[in-house]
Image (cartoon, coloured by chain):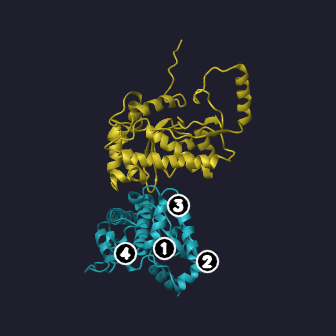
Chain colours: A yellow, B cyan
Amino acid sequence: MAMALPLAYASSVVNPFEAGRLSFSTKATKHKKHIYQFRKVTKVLAYYGLANPPYKLDALEPYMSRRTLELHWGNIHRGYVDSLNKQLANSPLYGCTMEELIKTTFNNGNPLPEYNNAAEVWNHDFFWESMQPNGGRLPWGGVLDQIEKDFGSFSNFRDEFVHSAMMLFGSGWVWLVLKTNERRLSIVRTSNAVCPLVWGDIPIISLDMWEHAYYLDYKDDVSKYVNNFMDHLISWHSATARMVRAEAFVNLGEPKIPVA
Amino acid sequence: MALRTLFSKKAFTTASGFRPIAAGDRCFLRQARGLTVAALPDLAYDYGALEPAISGEIMRLHHQKHHQAYVTNYNNALEQLETAMAKGDASAVVRLQSAIKFNGGGHINHSIFWKNLKPVNEGGGEPPHSTLGWAIDTDFCSLEALVQKMNAEGAALQGSGWWLALDKGSKKLSVETTANQDPLVSKGANLVPLLGIDVWEHAYYLQYKNVRPDYLKNIWKVINWKYASEVFDEETA
C-alpha cells in the first residue's frame, strides 16, 4: 500500500522532447549528445514524494474543511516528507520501500530518528485513502461479514471504535487492523507515530487523532469529529480493497478443499 | 483578582461518631473522611489580555473547555477510585491509574501554566532578576541560551507534551520535557516546576497553525518570570 514510491532520476539529463528539439538528429550529433550526457551525469538521486489525496482538497466538506486539508496535507504531511528526505540523504537506509523503512527504523521498539518521519508519511497517506467524499454508513460484503463475526454487530464495532478514539490520551491514531496471528479484526490505538505495520498486522482503516487533524473544524469537540468520520468520511471501498489484499496474507477461514 | 485554590475541601461530620464499617456505610464513610474535589482555578487576567502572543479565542477554549474537561474527568476518576478502593476491587483501582495520571496531570500542568503567563502591561516578558536570574546565568550561561534551548526542545517534542523547564531538585536548574499530560514529578520526585509551556497543538493551532516555533518565539513576551522567581526562592530558602 506504499504510495510514496522512490522516484529516481539522473541529475542532469535533458529530454530532447521537452527541450523542444527535433526527435531526429544526425547520427554524429546524436553520438556527441550521448557522450556529453553521460559525462554530465554524476549522481542518481532517489527520494520519497508527496502523494496527492485521492480527492480534491474541498471534497470532504463540511466534515473536514479545505483549510484543514491544506494545512494538514500541504504543510504537515509535506513537512514530514521533506524532513525524511533530508534525513535519508546521507543515510545507509537509502532506497527502501516505505514499509521496509518503517519496520527497520522502528527497531523493535527503540526507534531510530528516521522512524517518526517515515511512519508519519505512511500514516498520512493511509489516512487520506481511508476517507472519501460521501463515505461513512455501512460496509458491505466480506468486510461487513468479518466485522459482524469479530465484533458481534456493526454497531458494536462502531461504538468500540468511537470509545477507543475518545480514550486516547495525547496524540495518536486509531486503527481497524487485521491481526495476522489472531486472524481477526481488531481496534488498536497507537501513540504519536506508531503504526501497526511494525507488529506485522495489516491496517484496514485509520483515524488521525492528533489535534491538528480536527482542531480548526471542531475545536475541542472530539466526539463530533469521530462520529462525523464514522458517519460521513470513512471509505469502505478502501477498506474492502485492503481486506481483499490482506486475505492473500492471512487465512481467515478454513480452506474448502473438496474431498475426492 | 485572587486566584481560587486548586483544591477546595468539603468536609462533613457525622453526629454519630465512629462505628464499625458496614457495606451500607459508604456514604457516611465518605462524609466522615471529607470529600476533596479539584476545581478549575480562575485566571488572573482576561482571556484577551495576552494578545497578540496568544489569542483570546485560544485562551478561552484552553481554559473553559480543555482544562475544565481535565478537572471534571479527574474528579470522576477519583470518585470511581474511592468506590473501587472501598470495594477492594484491585483491578479497577489499577485500571483507573492512567485516567488519573492523564487528567490529574493535565489539571496540575495547566494550573501552573496559567500562573506562568502574564499580560505585557502587567510585567509579562520581563526577564528574571536577582536569585533566579543568577541561577539561570550559572546553569545556562545566559537567559538567551535558556530560551534557545527551551525553544529547541519544545519544537522537537513529538506529539503532545509539556515542557516544564527550570526545575530544581539538587539545587540546579534544568530543562525537561514530559509526554502527554505527565506532570513533572513523573520524571523525578525532586523536580519542582518553575516554568512550563504547553506544546499541545490545542495551545497554539488556531493561531499559529502548525508553525510551533513561531508560537514558542512569541510566548516569551508574556511569560511571568516573577512567579518563577517566587517559587524558586521558596524552594531554595
Q: Please, what secondary structure does the residue beneath circle 1 have?
A: loop
- Whether labels 3 and 4 share one chain: yes
Q: Nearer the viewer, residue B166 or B35?
A: B166
The circle drawn on residue B6 is 4
Q: Nearer the viewer, mark 3 or mark 1?
A: 3
Gap between marks 1 and 2 measured at Cα? 15 Å
Q: Which residue is mark 2?
A: B139
Q: Please, what secondary structure does the residue beneath circle 2 have?
A: helix
The image shows residue A60 at horizontal and vertical percentages of 35, 40
Mark 4 or mark 2: whose residue is earlier in sequence: 4
* Dot 3 alpha-carbon crowd within 10 angstroms: few under 14, some 14 to 19, many 20 or more: some
Evaluate if marks 1 and 2 touch, with contact meaning CB atoms under 8 Å apart: no
Q: Please, what secondary structure does the residue beneath circle 3 have?
A: helix
Q: Which residue is mark 3?
A: B155
- Observer able to see residue A111: no
Q: In the image, is residue A22 above or below residue A188?
A: above
Residue kind at label 2, given as amino acid type: Asp
Gap between marks 3 and 4 measured at Cα? 30 Å
Gap between marks 2 and 3 measured at Cα? 21 Å
